[in-house]
Image: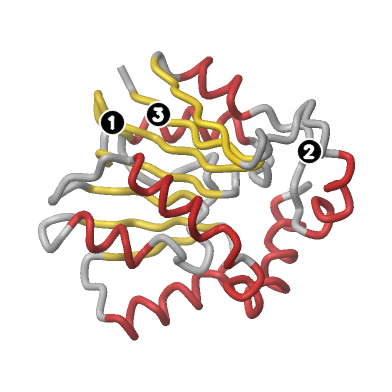
Amino acid sequence: MTLETIRQTFTDWAPHYDATHSWSLPNRREARLALGVQPGDRVLDIACGTGANFKHLSELVGEAGRVTGVDLTPAMLNIARAKIVRHGWENVEVHTADAAQLPFPAASFDRAICAFAMNIIPDYAEAIVEAWRVLVPGGRLVVLDLNLPGNRFARRLSRFARTCAVELGHDSITELRRTFADVEVRWRWVGLIYIAVAVKG
């Protein structure tokens, strides 16, 4: 998938995204808690979409912390911005950006999360390297996603995958282990979903 194809796909999805992805909320919460956020932390939400993680992350970092969301699709971010205004989340901001080219200096964040997007980001290996770059030493990246390479259910998901711009061949766990020294993987839904917790050495 090209960046433009993904942008167009999620421009079309944007008005319906929250309603059609409510199934993901329990796993998202577990992933957010796996971040180990402390009050005052700076948290990066990679491919934040409509801001499904923002309410909880905003509460976790507190007034002294900051939540920064990045996403490729302006239509998704427009919904996220409306939520920020509506709920008065003064410690949350969003930027349009490609996850493989993050517009932040090195060591800008204490924590980073990417929920159901590594299988969509075309250059996902570089996105993982970029997440490593912008984290402080000891910082933590949590990736929540579908485990598709080699999964016995993957073929049944191929039609869904095309609709959602998902690439079935992305092997994010291998790339996480290549980039981060410490990676723990937790399996959910009989191995179809994983939560990977990676710590920057």
Amino acid marked by disc 2? Leu
Q: Is residue 140 left or right of residue 73?
A: left
Q: Which marked residue is nearer to the observer: mark 1 or mark 3?
A: 1
Secondary structure beneath dot 2 equals loop
Amino acid marked by disc 3? Trp
> Residue 62: where, in percent of width, then height?
15, 60
For label 1, the crowd category at 10 Å Cα-Cα, with few meaning under 14, some 14 to 19 and many 20 or more, is many
Residue marked by disc 1: 139
As drawn, 100 above or below 85: above
> Residue 73: where, in percent of width, then height?
59, 64
Q: Residue furthest bottom?
A: 86
> Residue 44: where, in percent of width, then height?
36, 48
Residue marked by disc 2: 168
Question: In terms of sequence position, does the residue under pointer 1 or pointer 3 come before the other?
Answer: 3
The residue at the point 33 percent across, 23 percent down is 200
Secondary structure beneath dot 3 equals helix
Residue marked by disc 3: 132
The residue at the point 37 percent across, 29 percent down is 133
Question: In terms of sequence position, does the residue under pointer 3 or pointer 2 come before the other?
Answer: 3
Front one among 103 and 42: 42
Quadrant position of residue 24 = bottom right
Secondary structure beneath dot 1 equals strand
The residue at the point 34 percent across, 56 percent down is 68
